[in-house]
Image: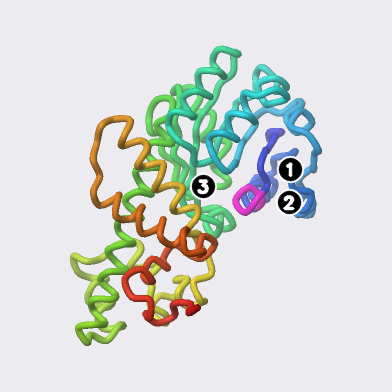
Amino acid sequence: MATIGWIGLGNMGLPMTKNLITAGHSVRGYDLSESARSAAEANGVTACTTVAEAVAGADAVFGMLPNGKISKEVFCGDGGVLEFAEPTALLIDSSTIDVASAREIHEAAQQAGFAFVDAPVSGGISGAAAATLTFMLGGRPADTARAKELVEPMAGNIFDCGGPGNGQAAKIVNNMMLTVSLQGAAEGAVLADKLGLDAQTFWNVASVSSGDSWPLRTWYPVPGIVETAASNNGFEATFSAALAHKDAGLAQAAAADVGVTLPGAKVAFESLQKLMDEGYAEKDCSLIIRNIDPQAPGVPQE
């Protein structure tokens, strides 16, 4: 069993570290938030007050952080992981960040003599709790092979996506497709209602026909149709508009970097931006149905 340093004990880091401990690993965790450290400690994590303390003597170090800027600071900045981790430690960043930042961390880690893997996840908080996350690994083959063994207690699926930054690339493209599909499900739900179709009947048709999609089956934005949908609970977040907006923005930036135009993704991004602008950042991303019909069933009213 390994000794693992973990940076970032929030909504995802908390259940992920719990699963590592259940598997027999020892976890030393750091977070800026005292309450996050306390919650992790209750799960068996050794709470630390600095990055240096968390990574000291660790066989591997994970990051689960909000964005690329913070990931670069935590791994590469003064007082960061590269300064204090054991030279033999495998460094793994499971944050969702831009591809350019991931590749910058890879380069800095390699120059400092470390093995580094970008390993973003899909599956959300529920997947983290259930240990069914999909891990997308990017890095040198020997490093991703080591990472597979460490992430297994947290994973339902593990994919080696290729070289440095490719894990982040896979995550960004996947989530771009998710937001486009969600936009389609929301538009379909509204149009079906306006044409006089019963919501359950239409869902039954679409879910076994060519209109099927993961958001339709899992996040359908009409109450009472899909058990796992946030629409059943006033659109309280399962995956917040803010996080979906962040990922959609990463896709837009990546597309610009490689000279690709993504018209469908642009519509989805603008729809999420509208929720952000109107104060719904912390509501579920499936609330984009509000942009199509503010009076749709279950939509919060001002």
Q: Which mark is residue 300?
A: none
Q: Residue drawn 75% across and 25% down?
A: 57
Q: Comparing marks 2 and 3, which lies closer to the viewer?
A: 2
Around disc 2, counting alpha carbons within 10 Å, would you say few (fewer than 14), some (14 to 19), or many (20 or more)? many
In this figure, which residue is indicated by the disc labeled 3? 155
Occupied quadrant, residue 221 = bottom left
Around disc 3, counting alpha carbons within 10 Å, would you say few (fewer than 14), some (14 to 19), or many (20 or more)? many
Could you say which is closer to the camera, residue 46 or residue 156? 46
State which region is magenta. Answer: 10-14
Q: Which mark is residue 36?
A: 2
Could you tell me how far apart the alpha carbons at marks 2 and 3 are, in whole angstroms? Answer: 22 Å
Could you tell me how far apart the alpha carbons at marks 3 and 1 are, in whole angstroms? Answer: 26 Å
Q: Contact (CB < 8 A) between labels 2 and 3?
A: no
Q: Comparing marks 3 and 1, which lies closer to the viewer?
A: 1
Q: Secondary structure at mark 3?
A: strand
Q: Contact (CB < 8 A) between labels 2 and 1?
A: yes
Question: In the rendered image, which quarter contains the N terminus?
Answer: top right
Occupied quadrant, residue 188 = bottom left
Could you say which is closer to the camera, residue 18 or residue 71? 71
- Main secondary structure type of the part rendered in magenta: loop
